[in-house]
């Protein structure tokens, strides 16, 4: 039973790193392009995931990438458009006065 623990841990680490790499934005990848990281993780069972965790993941607390910043700004604009407006903020209402 104890001999299966390293294999299960290696598999779990590989799955975790694979999912993390797939979900990470291309712009946030470090040192290698996204497809190379995915192949590296899948083909080298322990070395690939360890390399991803140490050298490929975006750094914690780093500034958001340009694409993340643009998405956030777009979400803010969308939320502002959906908010209910008072009569004095509604151009159609003011036009009818």
Image (tube, rainbow, N blue to C red):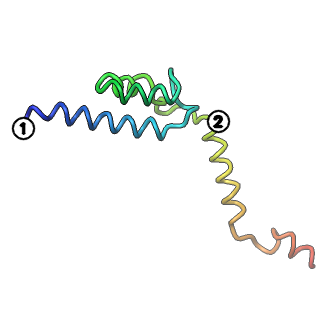
Residue 24 location in percent, x, y? 49, 37
User: How many C-alpha atoms fall within 10 Å of the one at disc 1: few (<14), some, or many (≥20)?
Assistant: few
Residue 16 as seen in the image, left or right of residue 96: left
Report which residue position mark 1 lands on: 1
User: How many C-alpha atoms fall within 10 Å of the one at disc 2: few (<14), some, or many (≥20)?
Assistant: few
Name which of mark 1 and mark 2 comes first in the sequence: 1
Residue 88 location in percent, x, y? 82, 71
Near-viewer residue (58 or 8) = 8
- The image's mark for residue 52 is none
Q: Residue at x 68, y 50 (%)?
A: 74
Image quarter hosting the C terminus: bottom right
Report which residue position mark 2 lands on: 66
Vertical relation: 12 (above or below) 55 = below
Q: Residue at x 34, y 38 (%)?
A: 16
Near-viewer residue (52 or 33) = 33
- Of tags 1 and 2, the one toward the viewer is 1
Near-viewer residue (33 or 52) = 33
Vertical relation: 77 (above or below) 25 = below
Residue 25 location in percent, x, y? 54, 37
Vertical relation: 12 (above or below) 36 = below
Q: Secondary structure at mark 1?
A: loop
Q: Quadrant of residue 42?
A: top left
Q: Secondary structure at mark 2?
A: helix
Q: Quadrant of residue 49?
A: top left
Q: Residue at x 45, y 30 (%)?
A: 57
Q: Quadrant of residue 38?
A: top left
Residue 36 as seen in the image, left or right of residue 97: left
């Amino acid at each position: 039973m104890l001999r299966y623990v390293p294999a299960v841990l290696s598999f779990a680490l590989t799955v975790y790193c694979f999912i993390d790499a797939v979900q990470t934005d291309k712009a946030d990848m470090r040192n290698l392009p996204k497809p190379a990281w995915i192949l590296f993780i899948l083909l080298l069972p322990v070395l690939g995931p360890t390399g991803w965790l140490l050298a490929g993941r975006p750094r914690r607390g780093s500034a958001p990438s340009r694409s993340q910043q643009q998405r956030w700004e777009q979400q803010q604009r969308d939320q502002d458009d959906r908010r209910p407006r008072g009569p004095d903020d509604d151009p159609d209402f003011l036009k009818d006065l």
